[in-house]
Image (spheres, rainbow, N blue to C red):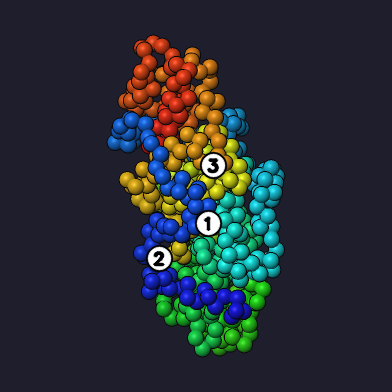
């Protein structure tokens, strides 16, 4: 056991900071430089270079006066929230079956055939199906585990782009951040593959108590929060604190430092064996009596001490409220209504922590229906949304490597948040001058087909033959295709003026100018506030 993960003890401090301090100090770009180490140097250099932008002042009326923007239809709003991005065929489907039916479909991912997506991943990314003992062996080798980490990152991106189980993939992303495990340069670079498959993806639509127990025994989480080093006589309190503050009752849940200490004692002896699998070592367990949040835990319980703690936390009323708040923040708005939180918490409690039914309560609520444009796409929603909107083809692994590098530059690449709290879920963390500029540059690279392995056929986005399409037709058809909503008149006029540059009044755009002009207008639309909203 010690030989497998002793190097991880040193990783609990970075430049003198504990993970606890990193929680308060690491920003959205906190892992700058680290993630690109996974990429080939030429690709990293290409992605780091900002491509040129069209010469149009991006003064969007929608940014200055968002209330003036015509709202999206209920179908568009639902797709914006329940998918990683709208494709025309998705909108046609929702318009045909109705919003309520689509929500029900997405809440039953087991009935949606995802075989094509998984076949691509199985062929190109073989480490996804490695058995835990194989993953444990790889985890010991710093060089061998990095390719495994990159394959899991690519899988997350490809599923976001290609899977028809879109709501499930959004839920996986939500719970990945809730039970955050930092990926880079540790045993977790390999162990996270099993954690993603056997913990997060297995329980994302299950019961929270089962999810919590699986996470607590996950080798990746044991390493991430130092519980593998938790022994009697010198207990490590990191997991004990975070399982309350971040995973269950929250910092306002009423626990004390004594509760932290008692929970740490309950989890002594939970560790890994030499093969990287969970192991309870009885000789390292504190067998004395404990009291946790007012609950007496008798002496001599062994491993069941920790299991009792997890049951107490999963059933605690504060856990229902905390999880309902986070889910409402993700799917309604940054400051969700108290009534929506209460309704979701009530479902959580009544169903014994059924996450699917809790989410159903949120998605079928009036608050959800009325929340169009209240959220902003984070980078891991923005880039997949652009890929899906453009109908881009993404090769695995070349294209997924390009998209991973792009997401790193946007500061939200999968599994790369270093602190234990997961990527933030509020507009203020992502929408700033630097973040918007990086979004712009990457969209220009995307529509310009400069990302290796990712291809966009711009001409196919616009119905009609190049050389016969007017500037107004170009703007309106691309608006319909990429945004599925109306623009404020002033914004449409600005786009139209740009599209008509160098084109005689009343004439179509010359065929020689059309590909570049169409790409520029598409990029401007994807850079607009309309596309940032969700």
Q: Quadrant of residue 392?
A: top right
Instruction: Label 2: state its secondary structure.
Output: helix
Q: Nearer the viewer, mark 2 or mark 1?
A: 1
Gap in Å between the C-alphas at discs 3 and 2?
35 Å
The residue labelled by disc 2 is 23
532 to 247, vertically: above or below: above
Residue that appears at 60% across and 54% down: 151
Q: Residue 112: x percent and y percent?
A: 67, 43
Q: Residues within 10 Å of mark 3 (few under 14, many from 20)?
A: some
Instruction: Label 1: state its secondary structure.
Output: helix
Question: Does the CB distance between marks 3 and 1 fall below 8 Å?
Answer: no
Left or right: residue 528 versus residue 366 is: left
Residue that appears at 52% across and 46% down: 403
Q: Residues within 10 Å of mark 2 (few under 14, many from 20)?
A: some
Q: Quadrant of residue 396?
A: top right
Q: Nearer the viewer, residue 137 or 216?
A: 137
């Amino acid at each position: 056991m010690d030989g497998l993960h002793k190097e991880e003890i040193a990783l609990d401090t970075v430049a003198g900071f504990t993970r606890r301090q990193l929680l308060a100090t690491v920003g959205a770009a906190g892992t700058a430089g680290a993630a690109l180490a996974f990429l080939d140097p030429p690709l990293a250099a290409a992605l780091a270079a900002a491509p040129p932008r069209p010469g149009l002042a991006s003064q969007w009326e929608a940014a200055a006066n968002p209330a003036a923007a015509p709202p999206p239809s209920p179908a568009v709003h639902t797709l914006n929230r329940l998918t990683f991005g709208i494709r025309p065929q998705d909108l046609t489907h929702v318009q045909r079956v109705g919003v309520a039916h689509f929500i029900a479909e997405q809440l039953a991912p087991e009935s949606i055939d995802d075989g094509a997506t998984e076949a691509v991943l199985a062929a190109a990314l073989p480490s996804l199906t490695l058995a835990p003992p194989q993953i444990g062996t790889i985890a010991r080798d710093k060089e061998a585990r990095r390719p495994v980490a990159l394959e899991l990152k690519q899988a997350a991106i490809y599923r976001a782009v290609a899977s028809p189980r879109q709501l499930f993939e959004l839920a996986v992303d939500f719970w990945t951040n809730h039970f955050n495990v930092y990926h880079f340069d540790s045993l977790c670079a390999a162990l996270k593959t099993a954690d993603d498959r056997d913990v997060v993806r297995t329980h994302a639509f299950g019961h929270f108590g089962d999810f919590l127990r699986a996470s607590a025994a996950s080798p990746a989480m044991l390493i991430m929060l130092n519980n593998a080093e938790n022994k009697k006589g010198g207990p490590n309190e990191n997991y004990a604190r975070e399982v309350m503050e971040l995973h269950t009752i929250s910092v306002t849940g009423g626990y004390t430092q004594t509760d932290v200490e008692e929970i740490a004692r309950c989890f002594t002896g939970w560790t890994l064996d030499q093969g990287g699998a969970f192991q309870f070592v009885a000789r390292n367990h504190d067998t004395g009596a404990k009291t946790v949040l007012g609950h007496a835990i008798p002496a001599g319980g062994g491993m069941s001490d920790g299991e009792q703690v997890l049951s107490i936390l999963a059933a605690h009323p504060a856990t229902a409220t905390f999880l309902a708040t986070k889910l409402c923040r993700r799917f309604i708005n940054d400051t969700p209504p108290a009534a929506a939180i209460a309704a979701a918490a009530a479902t959580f409690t009544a169903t014994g922590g059924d996450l699917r039914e809790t989410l159903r309560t949120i998605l079928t609520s009036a608050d959800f229906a009325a929340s169009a444009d209240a959220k902003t796409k984070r980078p891991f929603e923005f880039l997949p949304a652009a890929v899906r909107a453009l109908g881009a083809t993404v090769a695995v692994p070349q294209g997924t490597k390009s998209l991973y590098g792009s997401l790193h530059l946007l500061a939200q690449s999968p599994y790369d948040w270093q602190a234990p709290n997961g990527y933030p879920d509020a507009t203020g963390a992502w929408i700033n001058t630097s973040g918007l500029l990086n979004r712009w540059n990457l969209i220009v690279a995307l529509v310009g087909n400069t990302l290796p392995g990712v291809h966009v056929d711009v001409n196919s986005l616009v119905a009609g033959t190049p050389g016969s399409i007017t500037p107004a037709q170009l703007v309106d058809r691309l608006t319909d295709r990429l945004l599925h909503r109306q623009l404020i008149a002033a914004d449409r006029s600005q786009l139209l003026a740009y599209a008509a540059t160098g084109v005689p009044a009343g004439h179509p755009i010359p065929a020689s100018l059309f590909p570049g002009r169409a790409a520029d207008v598409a990029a401007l639309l994807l850079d607009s506030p309309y596309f940032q909203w969700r």
